[in-house]
Amino acid sequence: MNGQNREDIKPGIEVNIVEKSNQRSGILTNGIVKDLLTKSSFHPHGIKVRLESGIIGRVQEIIE
């Protein structure tokens, strides 16, 4: 599942995000969502989240 809809993302779920510094290369970082930072219900580049590790990025995949 992609990470464009805020309703699909909840704290505690496992996701792959792309950090701002890795947007060109597309390198993904795996982690558990701590906070949702995007307020809108949809974002075409992915909902911005903070992982429990403190890393911030946009959700590219939701791990089922």
Image: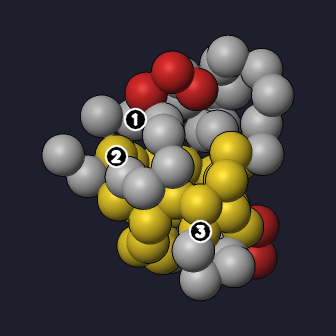
**Does residue 15 appear in the picture of this structure?**
no
In the rendering, at what x and y percent does residue 36 appear?
A: 68, 45
| Mark 3: secondary structure | strand
Which residue in the protein does label 2 denote?
62
Left or right: where does residue 41 sit relative to residue 2? right
Q: First in sequence: mark 3 or mark 2?
A: 3
Determine crowd level at label 2: few under 14, some 14-19, many 20+ residues with C-alpha closer than 10 A. Answer: some
Residue visible at 26% across and 52% down in the picture: 63
- Mark 2 is on which residue type? Ile
Res 51 label: 3
Q: First in sequence: mark 1 or mark 2?
A: 1
Res 2 label: 1
Mark 3 vs mark 2, foreground winner is: 3
In the rendering, at what x and y percent does residue 17 appear?
A: 52, 61
Residue visible at 34% across and 46% down in the picture: 62
Mark 1 vs mark 2, foreground winner is: 2
Residue visible at 68% across and 63% down in the picture: 50
Determine crowd level at label 1: few under 14, some 14-19, many 20+ residues with C-alpha closer than 10 A. Answer: some
| Mark 1: secondary structure | loop
State how far apart marks 1 and 2 are (Cα): 6 Å
- Mark 1 is on which residue type? Asn
Q: First in sequence: mark 1 or mark 3?
A: 1
| Mark 2: secondary structure | strand
- Contact (Cβ within 8 Å) of mark 1 with mark 3: no
- Contact (Cβ within 8 Å) of mark 1 with mark 2: yes
State how far apart marks 3 and 2 are (Cα): 13 Å
Q: Quadrant of residue 44?
A: top right
State whether residue 44 is above or below residue 63: above
Res 26 label: none
**Does residue 50 appear in the picture of this structure?**
yes
State whether residue 57 is above or below residue 30: above
